[in-house]
Image: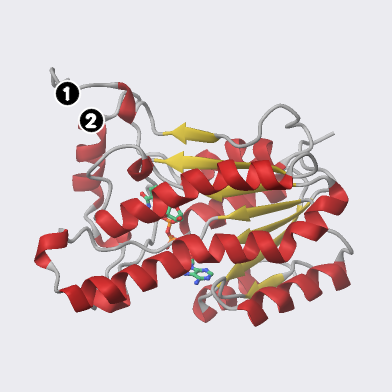
């Protein structure tokens, strides 16, 4: 029997990058996956790629009516939910705090925390009763930025630190019926992670960075030296989302290619 046979799994931020790779992996493992994303273009693309039987919904995780409509659609089609995988996120452009005006900082904070933190909280709140009923699982996405400096600017870093703490609290509040864990990737090769509107950086994407430069930098500092693609994270998310996981809750798996395992005294 495959790992996720008979599991119904909602993935938020499944339009590209990590969420898409993880969602596809979960499907391959036998799950019924509900693909959701804020981007209308990405939703249209997914509808072309997958069969009409796949539930693909435009859903902005910061909007309660969108999440409620998604919940209704899941109940109508499947009558239950076994796991929520949160993969949405936006980047802060890595601008040092001192280089922003206070007004920019104010707007940036609201924008980043809205998607990167409130989106996860609202999703957990709206789907927790369905997950209680199936003794289900929540898997959120943080980052190595929650553990070490220079993984983004101060606002992105704080938002990822918030997720790291949130899994502890949600695991406590939702025990014993829902397991809550997170994954902290370091880098994702095929990410389209966008910058913030508040700094007029929303047309910038991580995929704009020349591949060789990004790969070179990552290889020079990580132990395993490969730049992972979204799908490479699939097995970790799938295990945490599955009924096989009866041993972990309140934990974050740092999936960083050994990035945080070294102090830079030597250069390989
Ligand atoms: N790219 C990296 O190197 C990296 C490293 C560590 C962690 N992460 C985290 O991984 C997650 C996925 O990012 P990615 O790199 O795959 O980027 P991505 O942009 O390819 O994927 C994120 C998806 O979230 C969607 N999204 C944005 N706002 C949304 C909203 N309000 N509601 C619903 N969907 C929304 C986007 O449209 C996009 O499809 C993020 O949480 C990011 O912080 C990324």
Q: As drawn, is 233 to the left or to the right of 219?
A: right
Give the residue at mark 2.
221
Q: Residue at x 82, y 51 (%)?
A: 132
Q: As drawn, is 101 to the left or to the right of 22?
A: left
Q: Residue at x 74, y 57 (%)?
A: 128
Could you say where residue 88 lies in the image, as x and y percent from the top left? Answer: 50, 61
Give the residue at mark 1.
264
Q: In terms of depth relative to the viewer, which is nearer, 164 or 188? A: 164
**Mark 2: is the Cβ under 8 angstroms from ligand 1?**
no
Q: Are marks 1 and 2 in contact (CB under 8 Å)?
A: yes
Q: As drawn, is 208 to the left or to the right of 124?
A: left
Asked whether the viewer can see residue 14, the reply is no
Quadrant location of the C terminus in the rendered image: top left
Q: As drawn, is 61 to the left or to the right of 35?
A: left
Asked whether the viewer can see residue 45, the reply is yes
Could you say where residue 252 lies in the image, as x and y percent from the top left? Answer: 52, 36
Q: Secondary structure at mark 1?
A: loop
Q: Which picture quadrant has residue 100?
A: bottom left
**Mark 1: is the Cβ under 8 angstroms from ligand 1?**
no
Q: Which picture quadrant has residue 250?
A: top right
**Image vertical order of residue 87 relative to residue 252, above or below:** below
Q: Residue at x 15, y 58 (%)?
A: 96
Could you say where residue 14 lies in the image, as x and y percent from the top left? Answer: 57, 62
Q: In terms of depth relative to the viewer, which is nearer, 181 or 16? A: 181
């Amino acid at each position: 029997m495959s790992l996720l046979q008979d599991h119904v799994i909602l993935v938020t931020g499944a339009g590209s990058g990590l969420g898409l790779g993880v969602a596809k992996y979960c499907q391959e493992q036998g799950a019924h996956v509900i693909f959701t994303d804020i981007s209308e273009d990405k939703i249209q693309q997914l509808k072309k790629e997958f069969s009409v039987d796949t539930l693909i919904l435009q859903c902005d995780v910061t909007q309660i009516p969108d999440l409620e409509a998604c919940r209704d659609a899941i109940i109508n089609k499947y009558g239950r939910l076994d796991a929520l995988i949160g993969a949405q996120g936006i980047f802060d452009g890595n601008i040092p705090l001192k280089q922003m005006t206070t007004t920019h900082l104010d707007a940036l904070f609201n924008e980043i925390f809205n998607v990167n933190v409130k989106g996860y909280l609202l999703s957990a709140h709206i789907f927790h009763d369905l997950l209680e009923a199936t003794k289900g699982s929540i898997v959120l996405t943080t980052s190595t930025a929650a553990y070490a400096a220079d993984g983004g600017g101060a606002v992105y870093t704080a938002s990822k630190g918030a997720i790291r703490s949130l899994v502890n609290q949600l695991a406590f509040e939702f025990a014993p019926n829902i397991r809550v864990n997170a994954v902290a990737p370091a880098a994702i090769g095929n990410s389209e992670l966008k910058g913030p509107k508040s700094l007029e950086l929303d047309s910038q994407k991580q995929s704009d960075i020349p591949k060789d430069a990004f790969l070179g930098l990552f290889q020079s500092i990580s132990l395993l030296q490969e730049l992972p693609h979204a799908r490479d994270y699939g097995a970790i998310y799938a295990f945490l989302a599955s009924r096989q996981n009866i041993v972990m809750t309140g934990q974050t798996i740092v999936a960083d290619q050994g990035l945080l395992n070294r102090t830079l005294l030597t250069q390989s």
